[in-house]
Image (spheres, grey):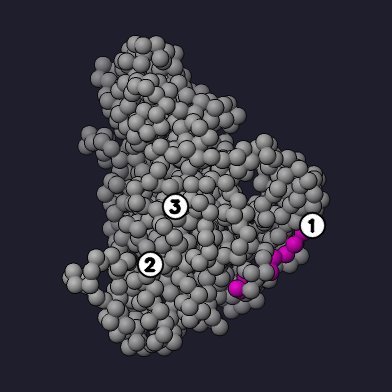
């Protein structure tokens, strides 16, 4: 059903309602209207990396891990599996008359905010720090969720519109200050691209920016979102955010004025209970009947697009057996494998020969932890494989010893309060093993959502640092596996002493098996960093400062620990003979030859960066502008073609306009940022192309 037909059907339905009935439908837990045969519908559902909060589901790698795959096609496949499971669950919910929260088909995912500051607790819900990667990954996720059939398979929702990325403690009343340049160059592109890709919904942020709360920002919602970008979907407040207009932002004198402010600005749906004041606002002429009708039609258009009112409900043939099925488990493992980032591999220490390792010690608070696999906004998998489980399964000829070694953080108030001392246990396992795998990092309890959920710095917690340094002082063969959702600095000593370092993120229910397979060389790692790993000894900008100066790879002035886009494999790739094949008004097409000079088959995550100058404004140091995947057998060679959307290589002026750069444009095609620093850590040198500006 196309949008026009769905809207016509919605008009017929809504036209039969009274004003009170229309208003009743503008809340997330919309009640039934029995006289019209309309069932209750709960709009609130979550599917960040799997159907969440609704029982059994495939728990795919967390969003930041999916971004690390640098593969939008893989993310689309994952999202397609998620919506298949969502439909399977919905079919049974309808059959059993269960239409409660987390049972509907409108998923409030993806989170396409920019991970601008490594301390932000919710950063791991995003696709990282880069607008292009975020936009492309977000578009792929939305396409997978919504499908390409006659009806929406499910409805995705881009959040949190628009300039929003912490601090969590302040979010309910915070007002971010951002320049027009930063807004256009960094904060809005992913929203623009996902809206133009047809996302069903957009969620407003709790916070405000430049003086106006996001859910009451008519300029943002009506002019930019609906006017400039042509958004036809529904706009929903974050949960409780309309109450914030009265209670925290203080832009209204009464609750009904707060509700009216959001509603008149273009917020169609309230996650929360403040739209209960809309009838009073209507009686006081703060809102009018035309706007009420418009909002109700918008919401029912989405419900019609989902096929809710069809005699034969679309996708009703998807069985419950699809939930966490064997095919989805296989896809989950593939996604986990592709998300792992090899950061160091001294003298080819990895892969390990699983037939020649006598013993492996798996040590650390994340060695046996299931929570670390899940991230947040998670479901419950039917099977979990921790790092220790996976290593035991893959290295089945080796003796596997396991110890927690320490807690995530030493939170003792005093030394005699019964806190369990685990260091000697961890050291005993490590020193008696041929190989030690240190599983360090965080979990959602230490970086997440809400008050106290942000990090105060990017350093590895002291309890873990103490354990890891003692292990590295005593053991020669140490591999560090960092399981976290953000930048963590393990310190120069550990970086130098560990033979190999892996960023494993929150890798999903089968993440431990993926780690083990990487260690054993069952695949060559291909993940790339979607964020910068900062040096924890250097100061960060003020968390509340939304200026992009000194933030992310595009504007960072200091050398970080590991750069955005970095990641090693088990073979060496050579990039050469890059050339422009076509230039037109909207795109630039390029190609490059890639040779695999090593002994392992590889999956190269090809990255195109632009560096350009403009006499009218400052420009990023580099801008990622195209992605591709090239599978190359050992000793093989491919010619990879890529297409650059010229939107991404335009200069952004101080007034927020996009212009063709008037200076030179350099394109770099490789597998990392084209910097001497990444090259020094083992990244292959990029092939370069020079073209003139305003071509």
Asked whether residue 239 is in view, the answer is yes
The relative height of residue 346 versus residue 368 in the rendered view (above or below) is below
Q: Which class describes the residues within 10 Å of circle 1: few (<14), some (14-19), or many (20+)?
A: some
Q: To which residue does mark 3 refer? A: 120
Residue at x 54%, y 45% (from the top left corner): 546
Report which quarter residue 302 is drawn in.
top left
Q: To which residue does mark 1 refer? A: 690
Residue at x 53%, y 77% (from the top left corner): 345
Query: Element type at marker 2?
Result: loop
Identify the mark at residue 461; answer none if there is no mark: 2
Rendered location of residue 401, percent (x, y): 30, 81
Residue at x 34%, y 34% (from the top left corner): 240
Mark 3 and mark 1 lie on one chain; the one further toward the N terminus is 3
Q: Nearer the viewer, residue 83 or 559?
A: 559
Asked whether residue 628 is in view, the answer is no
Mark 2 and mark 1 lie on one chain; the one further toward the N terminus is 2
Foreground mark, 3 or 1, reads 3
Rendered location of residue 499, percent (x, y): 49, 80
The relative height of residue 294 versus residue 506 in the rendered view (above or below) is above
Distance in Å between CA atoms under marks 2 and 1:
45 Å
Query: Element type at marker 1?
Result: strand
Report which quarter residue 686 is drawn in.
bottom right
Query: Which range is magenta?
Result: 681-689
């Amino acid at each position: 059903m196309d949008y026009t037909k769905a809207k016509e059907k919605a008009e017929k339905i809504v036209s039969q309602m009274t004003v009170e009935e229309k208003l009743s439908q503008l809340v997330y837990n919309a009640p039934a209207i029995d006289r019209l045969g309309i069932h209750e519908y709960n709009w609130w559902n979550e599917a960040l990396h799997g159907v969440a909060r609704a029982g059994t589901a495939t728990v795919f790698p967390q969003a930041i891990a999916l971004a690390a795959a640098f593969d939008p096609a893989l993310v689309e496949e994952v999202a397609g599996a998620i919506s298949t499971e969502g439909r399977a669950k919905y079919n049974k919910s309808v059959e059993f008359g269960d239409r409660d929260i987390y049972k509907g088909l409108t998923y409030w995912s993806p989170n396409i905010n920019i991970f601008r500051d490594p301390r932000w607790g919710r950063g791991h819900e995003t696709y990282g720090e880069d607008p292009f990667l975020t936009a492309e990954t977000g578009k792929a996720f939305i396409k997978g969720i919504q499908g390409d059939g006659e009806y929406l398979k499910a409805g995705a929702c881009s959040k949190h519109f628009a300039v929003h990325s912490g601090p969590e403690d302040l979010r309910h009343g915070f007002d971010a200050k951002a320049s027009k340049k930063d807004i256009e160059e960094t904060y809005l592109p992913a929203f623009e691209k996902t809206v133009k890709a047809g996302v069903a919904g957009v969620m407003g942020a709790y916070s405000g920016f430049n003086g106006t709360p996001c859910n009451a920002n008519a300029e943002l919602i009506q002019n930019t979102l609906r006017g400039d970008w042509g958004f036809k979907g529904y706009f929903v407040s974050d949960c409780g955010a309309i109450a914030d207009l009265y209670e925290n932002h203080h832009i209204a004198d009464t609750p009904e004025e707060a509700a009216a402010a959001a509603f008149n600005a273009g917020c169609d749906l309230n996650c929360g209970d403040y739209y209960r004041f809309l009838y009073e606002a209507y009686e006081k002429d703060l809102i009018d009947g035309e706007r009420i009708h418009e909002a109700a039609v918008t919401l029912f258009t989405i419900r019609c697009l989902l096929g809710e009112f069809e005699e034969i409900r679309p996708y009703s043939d998807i069985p419950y057996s699809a939930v966490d099925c064997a095919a989805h488990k296989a896809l989950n493992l593939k996604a986990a494998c592709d998300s792992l980032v090899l950061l160091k591999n001294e003298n080819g220490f990895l892969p390990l020969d699983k037939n020649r390792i006598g013993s492996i010690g798996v040590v650390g608070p994340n060695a046996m932890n299931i929570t670390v696999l899940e991230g947040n906004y998670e479901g419950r998998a039917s099977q979990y494989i921790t790092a220790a489980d996976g290593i035991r399964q893959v290295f089945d000829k080796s003796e596997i010893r396991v110890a927690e070694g320490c807690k995530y953080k030493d939170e003792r108030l005093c030394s005699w309060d019964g806190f369990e001392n685990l260091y000697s246990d961890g050291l005993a396992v490590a020193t008696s093993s041929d190989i030690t795998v240190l599983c360090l990092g965080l979990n959602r309890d230490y970086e997440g959502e809400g008050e106290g959920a942000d990090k105060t710095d990017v350093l590895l917690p002291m309890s873990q640092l103490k354990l890891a340094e003692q292990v590295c002082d005593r053991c020669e063969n140490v591999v560090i596996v960092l399981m976290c959702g953000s930048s963590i600095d393990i310190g120069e000593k550990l970086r130098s002493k560990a033979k190999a370092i892996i960023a494993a993120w929150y890798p999903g229910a089968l993440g431990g098996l993926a780690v083990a397979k990487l260690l054993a060389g069952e695949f060559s790692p291909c993940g790339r960093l979607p964020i910068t790993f900062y040096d924890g000894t250097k100061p960060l900008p003020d968390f509340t400062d939304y200026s992009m100066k000194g933030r992310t790879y595009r504007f960072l002035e200091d050398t970080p620990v590991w750069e955005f886009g970095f990641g090693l494999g088990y073979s060496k790739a050579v990039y050469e003979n890059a050339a422009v094949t076509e230039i037109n008004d909207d795109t630039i097409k390029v190609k490059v030859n890639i040779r695999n000079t090593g002994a392992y088959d590889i999956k190269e995550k090809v990255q195109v960066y632009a560096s350009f100058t403009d006499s009218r404004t400052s420009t990023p140091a580099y801008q990622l502008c195209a992605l591709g995947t090239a599978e190359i057998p050992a000793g093989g060679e491919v010619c990879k073609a890529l297409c650059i959307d010229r939107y991404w290589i335009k200069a952004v002026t101080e007034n927020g306009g996009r212009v063709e750069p008037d200076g030179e444009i350099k394109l770099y095609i490789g597998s990392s940022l084209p910097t001497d620093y990444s090259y020094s850590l083992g990244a292959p040198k990029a092939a370069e192309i020079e073209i003139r500006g305003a071509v």
